[in-house]
Image: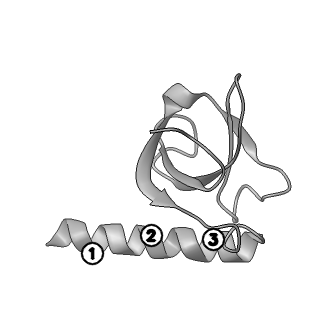
């Protein structure tokens, strides 16, 4: 899966392990991600693409317009995933 702006990923390594984040910008040397809470849109974290796993979700541009809306969208995705795993 191609990583692009709005793609939702699960972090696999680092102190933010097992956290859902959205891609702000993808570059050759890495991927900038944020979650709207610990990492804001204005100050995304550079992650090695080997240390993240894409999931089949994307955030729209309206969901990524502010930290609050990005955090809310990621929480909804997390809750939906938890509900599906219990079935």
Residue 9, label in figure: none
Of residues 36 and 3, the one drawn nearer to the viewer in this rendering: 3
Q: Which image quadrant is residue 71 in?
A: bottom right
Q: Secondary structure at mark 1?
A: helix
In-image side of 27 versus 87 (left or right): right
Seen at 56% across and 40% down, the residue is 3
CA gap between label 1 and label 3 equals 18 Å
- Do the CB atoms of the residues marked 2 and 1 lie less than 8 Å apart? no
Residue receiving disc 1:
83
- Outermost residue toward the top in this view: 29
2 or 1: tag closer to the N-terminus: 2
Of residues 44 and 59, the one drawn nearer to the viewer in this rendering: 59
How far across and down, in percent of the image, does residue 78 sit? 42, 68
Task: Indicate the quadrant containing the C terminus: top left, top right, bottom left or bottom right.
Answer: bottom left
| Classed neighbour count for the residue bearing mark 3: other residues with Cα under 10 Å, few (<14), some (14–19), many (≥20) | many
- Outermost residue toward the left in this view: 87
CA gap between label 2 and label 1 equals 10 Å
How far across and down, in percent of the image, does residue 79 sit? 39, 74
Of residues 22 and 40, the one drawn nearer to the viewer in this rendering: 22
Seen at 54% across and 68% down, the residue is 74
Residue receiving disc 3:
71
CA gap between label 3 and label 2 equals 10 Å
How far across and down, in percent of the image, does residue 70 sit? 66, 69
Q: Secondary structure at mark 2?
A: helix
Seen at 50% across and 26% down, the residue is 50
Of residues 18 and 57, the one drawn nearer to the viewer in this rendering: 57
Residue receiving disc 2:
77
| Classed neighbour count for the residue bearing mark 1: other residues with Cα under 10 Å, few (<14), some (14–19), many (≥20) | few
- Do the CB atoms of the residues marked 1 and 3 lie less than 8 Å apart? no
1 or 3: tag closer to the N-terminus: 3
């Amino acid at each position: 899966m191609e990583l692009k702006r709005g793609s939702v990923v699960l972090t696999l390594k680092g102190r933010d392990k097992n956290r859902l984040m959205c891609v702000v910008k993808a570059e050759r040397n890495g991927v900038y991600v944020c979650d709207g809470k610990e990492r804001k849109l204005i100050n995304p974290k550079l992650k090695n693409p080997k240390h993240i796993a894409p999931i089949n979700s994307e955030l729209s541009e309206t969901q990524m317009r502010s930290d609050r809306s990005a955090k809310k969208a990621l929480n909804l995705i997390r809750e939906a995933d938890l509900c599906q795993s219990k079935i």
